[in-house]
């Protein structure tokens, strides 16, 4: 019975990679943690030319198998690419000013309204800085309801001259929200749950040999245009793809309940359609039926919004049947997101059971 | 070798009413595969494109038309039982007002619009203001219609004098023209691949993967073009023949591919017009950029919008397009050498 259990969600990995910096294009620290974790558990692993971590793991030799020779396609099931992106939204330092202040640009979709007053960690050494904002005492009455434009904001690392600032920070370095992972009840708080939640779910799935051949891809540069996964998909050439995401909860107090979905804590969210993808109908059916059979609660992601790596994987080469399964998180693309750790476990379980079904059902 | 009007007369209405919103082209796929029986072996790929191969000795020619039609997707069901919608693809919210929509077997309904109270309100109509009334009521509707349910326009093309009028003629007219051209075609001088592509309205997704797989030597993309959208070479008109595309967003014709189409038009004595689009585009951009690039031409059937869900197409434009395509498949492609 024990061998038939779905793998357990690895919360330690989520904590480690949530705390690590990894703005699009600078995912090294996150990749290093995942590579250390995966190395002993997979059959082969490489960092591809874009920087994505690509690991291949062969299925367990099944005692219930059809007796077909090892290596033949039949009986092994489809080759599935599971993909989660390592990068997070953040800032890039673009100039050091005479007075020691840092100008920056946003990398990925950050609402400029949430920036003033936020603490950040800059560069590999994690230099602390805050985005300068005048206290309310000094804001003219007429400006109190206004938001400072992102172009007018600056990072302050407490340096008073350019020389002093340049000793600690250099142009081109990335900055991430200065947030530390925490846990209470079933709630987990941290930065970059979009998509470190998906990365940790994927890591959890490779603890044991999967039911079908799997290539795990932890991709780069999703937040700036789904770039890493597009390149990886061409290289991997899978039969199917499932993208694992941390997606936005729709909860907003005061709205009618039917408008607030999906909810944190109510199970993995399934995508029918977003701006990048129409989920493959049969693959989506298979995931849904698996969820019903194994009593994993699921909900729908809101159609028509967002885009994921799946959109690019689906149209790579001659096309790849693709779907997206997400852990619903509150407050993504912001300093601190929340997720329910039960949703993370349910997502691991759902994907594992789906791989089992695909082995039998997919031609 | 004139096309048989009787064939198109039954084919076009049948194709126009088949269910096929982008990414869920189940009905049209089945209808096309039925219509292709006896023409050649068909197959379906990961994106849902329908492929047909008629092997031949010449260069590999891809003839393609998208088969998906405008679609909607349910974003929620209000307690009152009205389904709220988001639009799949490029159609505008206004195009859907008054349309009959089928949710592929689950239910059917009519699209309404929350008209602003202020009659002077002139803002653009947003999809959020649309609703689908299915008559299922507040009890049944939330049970039977789930978030993510996909719908398509339910409409059958009809003949009005010399015109065809229907909701899904973009691009079922193009599909019908290709079918009519390859059915019983004699003297095909190319290795012919036909693709009815999926998910065109979502950004030429199906055409991209098909062209990648086929690696054609030359491609002709068939679509429709609307009166009022061509700039620079004079506007297009109904009844003056198919349009040859000169420019779209992300696409310029390859001289050798364009020469092939022009030569076929001349030989078949088919009049043509020019299409110059400043914004938006067909599958042509995805096909021409596949692999290391494919010499590609675009042929578009003129159509006129009504401001509602239906459009008009001139029957003679459709017949002339069939003649032109017959010419294309029977003209050997000579590549760059024959282009000037």
Image (tube, coloured by chain):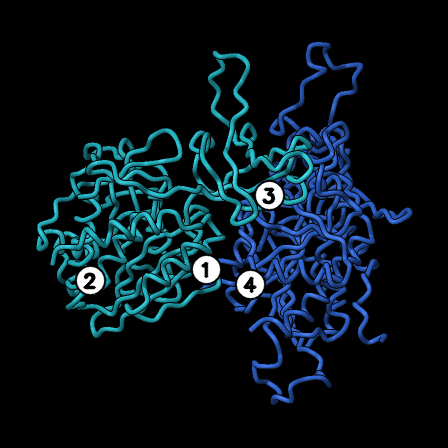
Chain colours: A blue, B cyan
Are the residues flagged by discs 1 and 2 from a single subunit? yes
Q: From mark 3 to mark 1, how far is it between C-alphas?
A: 20 Å
Q: Say the numbered circle drawn on residue A336.
A: none
Whether the residues at callouts 2 and 3 have beta carbons within 8 Å, the answer is: no
| Numbered disc 4: secondary structure | helix
Judging from the image, mark 2 belongs to the subunit labelled B
Judging from the image, mark 1 belongs to the subunit labelled B
Residue A168 visible (yes or no): no
**Which numbered disc, 1 or 4, marks the residue closer to the eye?**
1
Task: Give the labeled residue for mark 4.
Answer: A232
Task: Give the labeled residue for mark 3.
Answer: A303
Task: Give the labeled residue for mark 2.
Answer: B329
Is B160 on the left-hand or right-hand side of A50? Answer: left
Residue A100 visible (yes or no): yes
Q: From mark 4 to mark 2, how far is it between C-alphas?
A: 38 Å
Judging from the image, mark 4 belongs to the subunit labelled A
| Numbered disc 2: secondary structure | helix
The front one of B143 and A219 is: B143
Task: Give the labeled residue for mark 1.
Answer: B48
| Numbered disc 3: secondary structure | loop
| Numbered disc 1: secondary structure | loop
**Mark 1 or mark 2: which comes first in sequence?**
1
Q: Residue furthest top?
A: A141
Q: From mark 1 to mark 2, how far is it between C-alphas?
A: 24 Å
Q: From the top left corner, tell me how far across and down residue A150 is, in percent.
A: 63, 29
Please tell me how crowded label 2 is: few (under 14), some (14-19), or many (20+) other residues with Cα within 10 Å.
many
């Amino acid at each position: 019975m024990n061998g038939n259990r779905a793998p357990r969600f690895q919360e330690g990995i989520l904590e480690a990679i949530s705390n690590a910096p990894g703005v699009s294009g600078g995912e090294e620290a996150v990749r290093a943690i995942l590579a250390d974790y995966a190395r002993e558990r997979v059959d082969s692993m490489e960092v591809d030319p874009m920087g994505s971590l690509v690991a291949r793991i062969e299925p367990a030799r099944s005692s219930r198998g059809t007796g077909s020779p090892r290596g033949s396609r039949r009986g092994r099931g489809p080759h599935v690419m599971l993909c989660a992106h390592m990068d997070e939204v953040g800032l890039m330092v673009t100039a050091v000013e005479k007075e020691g202040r840092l100008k920056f640009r946003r990398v990925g979709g950050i609402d400029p309204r949430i920036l003033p007053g936020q603490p950040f960690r800059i560069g590999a050494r994690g230099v602390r800085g805050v985005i300068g904002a005048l206290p309310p005492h000094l804001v003219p009455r007429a400006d109190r309801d206004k938001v400072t434009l992102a172009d007018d904001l600056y990072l302050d690392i407490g340096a008073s001259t350019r020389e002093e600032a340049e000793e600690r920070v250099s142009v081109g370095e990335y900055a991430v929200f200065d947030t530390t992972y925490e846990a209470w009840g079933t709630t987990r708080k941290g930065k970059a749950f979009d998509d470190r939640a998906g990365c940790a779910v994927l890591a959890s799935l490779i603890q044991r040999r999967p039911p079908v051949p799997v290539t795990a891809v932890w991709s780069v540069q999703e937040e700036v245009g789904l770039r890493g996964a597009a390149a990886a998909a061409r290289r991997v050439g899978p039969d199917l793809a499932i993208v694992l995401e941390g997606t936005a909860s729709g909860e907003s107090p005061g709205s009618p309940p039917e408008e607030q979905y999906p909810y944190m804590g109510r199970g993995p969210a399934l995508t029918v359609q977003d701006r990048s993808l129409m989920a493959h109908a049969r693959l989506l059916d298979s995931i849904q039926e698996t969820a019903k059979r194994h009593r994993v609660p699921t909900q729908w992601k809101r159609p028509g919004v967002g885009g994921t790596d799946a959109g690019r994987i689906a149209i790579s080469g001659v096309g790849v049947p693709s779907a997206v399964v997400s852990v619903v998180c509150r407050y993504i693309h912001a300093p601190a997101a929340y997720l329910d750790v039960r949703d993370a476990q349910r997502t691991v379980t759902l994907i594992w059971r789906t791989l089992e079904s695909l082995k039998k059902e997919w031609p | 070798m004139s096309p048989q009007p009787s064939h198109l007369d039954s084919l076009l209405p049948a194709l126009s009413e088949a269910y096929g919103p982008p990414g869920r082209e189940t009905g049209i796929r089945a209808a096309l595969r039925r219509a292709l029986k006896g023409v050649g072996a068909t197959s379906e790929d990961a994106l849902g494109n329908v492929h047909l191969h008629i092997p031949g000795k010449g260069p590999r020619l891809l003839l393609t038309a998208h088969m998906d039609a405008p679609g909607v997707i349910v974003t929620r069901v209000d307690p009152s039982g009205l389904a709220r919608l988001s639009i799949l693809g490029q159609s505008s919210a206004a195009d859907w007002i008054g349309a009959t929509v089928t949710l592929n077997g689950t239910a059917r309904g009519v699209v309404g619009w929350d008209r602003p109270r202020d009659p002077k309100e002139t803002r653009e109509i947003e999809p959020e203001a649309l609703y689908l009334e299915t008559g299922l009521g507040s009890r049944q509707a939330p049970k039977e219609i789930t978030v993510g349910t996909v719908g398509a326009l339910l409409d059958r093309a009809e003949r009005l004098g010399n015109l065809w009028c229907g909701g899904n003629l973009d691009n079922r007219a193009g599909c019908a023209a290709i079918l009519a051209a390859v059915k019983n075609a004699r003297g095909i001088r190319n290795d012919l691949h036909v693709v009815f592509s999926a998910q065109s309205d979502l950004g030429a997704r199906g055409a991209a993967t098909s062209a990648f797989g086929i690696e054609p030597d030359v491609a002709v993309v068939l679509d429709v073009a609307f009166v009022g959208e061509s700039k620079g070479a004079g506007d297009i008109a109904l009844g003056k023949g198919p349009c040859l595309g000169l420019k779209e967003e992300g696409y310029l014709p390859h001289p050798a591919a364009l020469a092939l189409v022009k030569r076929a038009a001349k030989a078949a004595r088919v009049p043509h017009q020019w299409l110059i689009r400043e914004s938006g585009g067909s599958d042509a951009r995805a096909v021409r950029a596949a692999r290391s690039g494919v010499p590609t031409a675009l042929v578009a059937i003129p159509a006129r919008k009504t401001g509602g869900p239906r459009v008009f197409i001139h029957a003679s434009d459709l017949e002339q397009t069939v003649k032109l395509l017959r010419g294309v498949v029977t003209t050997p492609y000579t590549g760059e050498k024959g282009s000037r």
